[in-house]
Image (cartoon, helix red, strand yellow):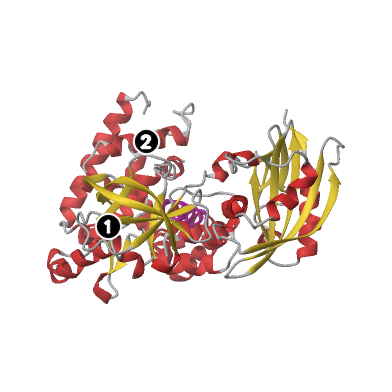
Amino acid sequence: MKSRRIVNAMNHIDDDLISEAVNETTRKKSTLIKWSAVAACFVVIIVSISIVGPMLFDKDDPIVDIGGTGEEGVLVKYYDYKINDGEFADYIGGEVISEGMIGNKIDTVTVTAGWKNDVGKWLSTETLSADVYEIEGVPKEIKVALKFKDKGEALTTTHYYQISMVLPNYSEENPVRYLESTNMGPANGWQDFGISGEIRTITVPLGSTYIYQMYSYYIRNDLSHLYPNQALPTSLDELPEWLAYTETTERIMFWYSMSLRLPTSISLTKTSEIISENGDMRFISAEYQIFSNEKTENCVIYFMEKDGVYSAFAVFANENFDFVKTYTESIVKSYQEKE
Amino acid sequence: MNDLNIIELYFARDEQAIKQTDIKYGKLCHSIAYNILNNAEDSEECVNDTYIGIWNAIPPTRPSNFKAFICRITRNLSLKRLETMSRQKRSEATLVSLDELAEILPDESIACGISDEDIAKLISNFLRSQKEDVRGIFIRKYYFFDSVSDIALRYSFSESKVKNILHRTRAKLKDYLIKEGVKL
């Protein structure tokens, strides 16, 4: 009995302690002698990861292949930077972006740059000057490019780095409230939808995977958060068309928040009206085709309005679009005001 | 591929998500499962179950620490499997580490007012006050169930030093819990 208690208790120790123990072990796995043999490569890799690294590796990835030896090493420190103030202060980056995509210069900023350890704590900092540029076809509210004027610890000032806004953690904002637990996993899960309601997004137990792999969904409550500088349409019925308008790129924020892929065009194919089972709420169901450089996606979005605030339950179908529509329509119809 | 990108693949219901998870964390999952189950076949199945578990959990969950998230699921599933396996097949090494800790932690019947989460919080706080090496060794032993010889090898310590550290840390933890009001 005691053992069981301990097993359970240990399972709840903090995440950072667990990942630290994993990193620690990997880091110490190699002996000093082994490390010294690759030390030269390693120093170069640390520099390359942060400065020109994005051209060679996935960005921000602390586990690297040391000098192509197939040995995994954990990055013990890396070079990072952050714009000090102004409208881009919260942006994070930054893969290198080709000069051909760079637009007008829009700002000059000061940047705090320096080394961070593997848990993101600054080890040293320096203040550098950099110019901010627009990226062609991308609103500056989403992404801009940064070009350093001072070298600092970097080897050159040749490259442009794309940095982008940080979206809120929507899953954290809308946690699922499970009402049942079965041996197949939790079931009957409700999530906030709109400013005062909720929908039953998880119906069957999570262990029954098949339905869930047919689609992915995103809940965006209060769309005005995504469009702080724009007026949304005055009527819910105009909203689907408004969001499909891609002549001005500023409107793609909603789509960007869901896939982090910038759509090249959006086509609204069908709209219809749905009423919740309890008769309390009216929804507009809008079907779209989303085209991006990588692929075309089918989605259906259920829009609602409550006290002048618009919210959306967006569903992207991976297969069986018609089934997904029928299934997710039943989810939307479960809408109720929270108690 | 970095963790954020892998999580995005899960959100997009892209099967590459599992492949990329396996490439990056497959070895780690296997070692956790194997330490607990001591059997390659069972470990393999457990790791597969872990991937299904992750697939089911994301979305809607968006883990802030993906690595710890995976470790937790693998450990849970492995322990569940261990429980359902016959006693003969249990890993003796695992039972030993649990017995050691059992000496210092409260029984449910005694400390029934304290939840597992509360005890875990105290253990986390205690570990934070310890040196990084000590903390790592303790977690490697009692979270990941690494053997003393594996820990010694990885930290370049002798086995007796590792045993000594574990012994002293257990004693300190016991004192700490008593001071925090956990009746033993």
Q: Nearer the viewer, mark 2 or mark 1?
A: 1
On the rendered structure, is B18 left or right of A63? right
On the rendered structure, is B161 left or right of B55? left
Residue B139, which numbered label? none
Give me the chain letter of mark 2.
Answer: B
Which residue is disc 2 drawn over? B105
Q: Is residue A136 above or below residue B109?
A: below
Q: Main secondary structure of the magenta part?
A: helix
Q: Are marks 2 and 1 on the same chain?
A: no
Q: Secondary structure at mark 2?
A: loop
Q: Is residue A280 above or below residue B69?
A: above
Decide whether residue A189 is among the magenta residues. no
What residue is at 59 percent from the left and 55 percent from the top?
Answer: A249
Q: Position of residue B36 (x, y in %)?
A: 41, 58
Q: Is any atom of residue B96 visible in this view? A: no
Q: Residue furthest toward the front? A: A104
Residue span colored magenta:
B67-80
Q: Position of residue B77 (x, y in %)?
A: 51, 55
Q: Which quadrant would the C terminus of chain A be assigned to in this image?
A: top right
Q: Secondary structure at mark 1?
A: helix
Decide whether residue B73 is among the magenta residues. yes
Q: Amino acid at mark 1?
A: Thr
Which residue is disc 1 drawn over? A25
